[in-house]
Every structure is written in C-alpha cells, then in structure tokens.
C-alpha cells in the first residue's frame, strides 16, 4: 500500500503558480513613467512684442487683476494702454531681447529718474502705466522684501514649461513690487500661481504664464497676470531641441547670454505662431489703488489664449511605478486564489487516498 497525491493537490499547486506569476509580473513590469525628465533651459526667452492690431491682443502683455477677482477677471485698466481693451498692457522686449533663464538681469542704479520712472529695461522695455513708466528686472536680492533669491530658471518637461521666477521684480513710481512666482519665501499667496507654459522643441516657440499677487504697498492684493510669448534661444548658440544644462556660475550670473545688450544683436529665428485671445468690455472701480490716479477695471473674461495652464509636475529623474488599476487586478486575483485554495482544502479531506 502507498499514498498518492489527490487530484485537488495538483489544482492547488496550479493556483499558487498563477498567483506567484501574477505578482512577479506586477513587480517586474516597468509600468508607465511618473513624469518626463525635467531639463533646465539656459538661454534667452526672446519676447514677441505685444500688439493690439485688429482689436485683439497678441504677443507679450500684462494684466492687473482686482483684489476681488480671479484669473478670469475683473481686471484693472491702464489709461496709457494702446489697446481698445485697456486691461491689456502690451510689452516690448528689452535690450537683452527678453527673459534670461539661468542668470539675473538686475535693476540699474539709479533705479528711477527724478519723476519716478523706472530705468530698468533688459527684460522688457519700460511701459507707461498711469503716466509713469514701469519696468521689469531680476536681482540676487529682491528689492521689495530684501530676501536673497535664486536666479530665474525655466524648465522643460517634454513640451511643457515650469519655472522658478521668484527674482522677477517690477519698478514703478519709485517703488518696488515683487511679481515673481513663487514669492521670495517660496510661497504662493492669494491668487499667485505657478509658472507654466508650452514649448516647441523644434522651433523654440514658447508661451509662459503666471500670476503673482502684490503683497504690501499701494497695490496690495492686486495680482499681475503675465503672459510672455516668443522664441527661446539657448545659450552657446545651440538649437532649441538640444537646449539644457545646469545654468550659470555660483553667483547666478550667466557668462553666455544669447543676446548682447551692448550691441543689441540677436540671433535671427522664425517668428512663432501666437495665440490670439479675444477681448471684451466691462467696468469695476480701482481708484484707490493708484496714487494720484483714477483707474477703472475691466470685467472681461480672460481669453482662451491667455488662460493659465495648470502647473506642470516634474521630477529631476525618471522613475517607474505601476498604475492603481494594475495593483487592484493583482489583488483581486490573489484574493480569488486564496478563496479557491480554502474551498479546495475543505473539499479534499486529508489530501491523500490509498491505492490498491
């Protein structure tokens, strides 16, 4: 007489094998990438000048959101705007051609003339705002908060852009206003939103948008909506599709700007296609905001071409993970297997029979 395995023992072994294979496949399979690799873009984001030709805004511009508003408005109007919808203030590129990623473009000394007009002009050319010129700059120490800040840096993840522009500053009427994102302390107060945008690696065409709430001063709780568009020119004269790198030196300066402020020379690239947002009309009071002025806001909704894109989530390296639904299926298979094992165990008795 001898003992032989009962049939249900083979079934039990087969079920265990299925479960083990499913779990092994789950752990070994690469799944999907959690995010694209984030690459620092060093060079100049050359700006396309803002224009209101044909009654529509094109190119680079600024809008000021009233304290009661959101990215959809209402907006404050600028009596010096050349647009029919004066909530848009078109901006022209400065002497550097635009925003340098990887280096500072500091406020000059003196920062203002005798009338309070801003003298900076490397990122954007000075523009009139209620009779006084304002300008943009980036500095190692934020002039408003006196906080040391990192140099501006824009990153690409595929065709999406993100960035750190906490050093971005506005000078106007002998006053300083941080208009960066995040703020110098790294926070996003009020309506401040992360830098986001799109990027064509083949042509260098880009769009960057962010909002930055003013903290303190006569424009406290007003929010600047910045819309920059143009063509990225990488440092060292490389092609946009191969742009990237660690940035400038230890002090945040860049030794290889894509444009020359001294000569005004700029590489020639094809003009990018610019999305055209629609304009509207409306009114809202903001008289208390401007010293000596009586501006009014515009109740227009933000146009589709100017809507703020959601902040791009990026990582410094690619890592793999498994989607939740794959995990759920594996767990269901495992549970079903253990249930089957339990049922087989109860129905199989001792698991052996005697053979004649």
Image: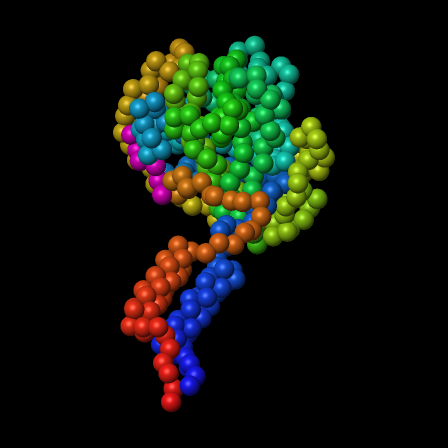
Spot occupied by residue 185 in the image (x, y as percentages of width and height)? 51, 24
Residue at (41%, 74%) from the top-left corner? Answer: 14
Q: Is residue 64 left or right of residue 231?
A: left
Which of the 4 quarters of the picture holds residue 141? top right
Note whether residue 121 is visible.
no
Say which of 3 and 36 sits in front. Answer: 3
Note whether residue 19 is visible.
yes
Q: Which residues are magenta?
A: 299-304
Q: Main secondary structure of the magenta part?
A: loop
Q: Is residue 146 magenta?
A: no
Spot occupied by residue 59 in the image (x, y as percentages of width and height)? 47, 39
Residue at (38%, 89%) from the top-left corner? Answer: 356
Considering every residue shown, the one lying at the far front of the view is 1
Number of numbered markers: 0
Spot occupied by residue 326 in the image (x, y as percentages of width and height)? 40, 60
Residue at (53%, 24%) from the top-left corner? Answer: 184
């Amino acid at each position: 007489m001898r003992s032989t395995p009962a049939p249900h023992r083979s079934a039990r072994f087969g079920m265990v094998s299925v479960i083990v294979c499913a779990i092994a496949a789950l752990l070994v399979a690469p799944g999907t990438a959690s995010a694209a690799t984030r690459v620092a873009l060093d060079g100049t984001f050359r700006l396309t000048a803002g224009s209101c030709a044909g009654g529509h805004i094109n190119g680079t511009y600024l809008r000021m959101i009233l304290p009661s508003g959101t990215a959809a408005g209402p907006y404050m109007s600028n009596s010096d705007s050349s647009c029919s919808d004066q909530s848009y203030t078109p901006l022209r590129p400065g002497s550097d051609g635009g925003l340098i990623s990887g280096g500072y473009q500091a406020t000059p000394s003196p920062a203002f003339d005798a009338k309070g007009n801003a003298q900076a002009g490397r990122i954007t050319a000075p523009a009139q705002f209620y009779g006084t010129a304002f300008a943009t700059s980036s500095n190692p120490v934020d002039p408003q908060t006196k906080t040391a800040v990192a140099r501006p840096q824009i990153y690409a993840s595929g065709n999406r852009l993100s960035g750190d522009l906490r050093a971005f500053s506005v000078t106007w009427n002998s006053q300083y206003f941080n208009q960066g994102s995040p703020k110098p302390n790294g926070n996003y107060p009020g309506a401040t939103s992360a830098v986001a945008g799109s990027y064509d690696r083949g042509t260098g065409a880009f769009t960057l948008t962010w909002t930055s709430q003013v903290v303190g001063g006569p424009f406290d709780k007003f929010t600047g909506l910045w819309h920059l568009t143009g063509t990225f020119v990488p440092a060292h004269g490389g092609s946009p599709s191969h742009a990237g790198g660690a940035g400038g030196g230890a002090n945040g300066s860049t030794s290889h700007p894509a444009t020359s402020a001294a000569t005004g020379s700029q590489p020639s690239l094809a003009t990018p296609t610019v999305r055209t947002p629609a304009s509207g009309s409306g009114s809202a009071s903001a008289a208390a905001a401007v010293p000596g002025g009586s501006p009014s806001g515009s109740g227009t909704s933000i146009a589709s071409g100017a809507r703020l894109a959601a902040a791009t989530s990026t990582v410094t390296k690619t890592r793999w993970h498994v989607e939740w639904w794959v995990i759920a299926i594996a767990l269901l298979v495992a549970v079903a297997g253990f249930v089957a094992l339990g049922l087989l165990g109860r129905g199989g008795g001792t698991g052996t029979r005697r053979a004649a």
